[in-house]
Image (cartoon, rainbow, N blue to C red):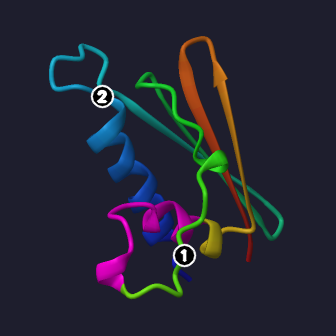
Amino acid sequence: MNLNLALEEIVSNIILYAYSIESPANKIFIEFIKTGSKLKFIISDYGKPFDPTTKDEPDITLEAVDRPIGGLGIFLVRQIMDDIAYSRENGMNKLILYKSV
């Protein structure tokens, strides 16, 4: 199962894009909930607002040299997880990843 890859992509994106180097609140919160055969990961941060659920999927039919850089990480997360949801609450990005096992 590629859960590690999905979580790594999300956390990497937060580190690279959500916070500036000068930002005093460079924190990422990860919560894991297991209910029966369902997994739920809640990843929260105080970084710049970004809703990955609205990101267009890359055209993977194009050759790699013809595609714009970026966008494959979120695409992979969508392929690995059953569902993803985003909200912005009290100045925090909250991304919820769902997976049945």
Q: What secondary structure is marked by label 1?
A: loop
Residue under label 2:
19
Indicate yes or no whether the magenta region holds residue 67: yes
- The answer to whether 55 is drawn above or below residue 72 in the figure is above
Circle 1 packing at 10 Å, graded few (<14), some (14-19), many (20+), is: few
Q: What secondary structure is marked by label 2?
A: loop
Q: Which residue is most to the front?
A: 66
Q: Position of residue 42 (x, y in %)?
A: 61, 43
Q: Amino acid at mark 1?
A: Asp
In screen coordinates, is 24 left or right of 94? Answer: left
Q: Position of residue 41 (x, y in %)?
A: 62, 51
Residue 59: give its label. Answer: 1
Q: Position of residue 46 (x, y in %)?
A: 44, 22
Indicate yes or no whether the magenta region holds residue 99: no
- The answer to whether 51 is drawn above or below residue 65 in the figure is above
Dominant secondary structure of the residues highlighted in magenta in the image: helix
Give the residue displayed 45% in from the left and 68% down from the top: 72
Alpha-carbon span between mark 2 and mark 1: 28 Å
Q: Which residue is most to the left?
A: 21
Which of 99/76 is in front?
76
Q: Please state the total of marks drawn on the protein image.
A: 2
In screen coordinates, is 38 left or right of 93? Answer: right
- The answer to whether 97 is drawn above or below residue 22 in the figure is below
Q: Quadrant of the C terminus?
A: bottom right
Span highlighted in magenta in the image: 64-77
In screen coordinates, is 87 left or right of 73? Answer: right
Q: Earlier in the sequence, mark 2 or mark 1?
A: 2
Residue 32: give its label. Answer: none
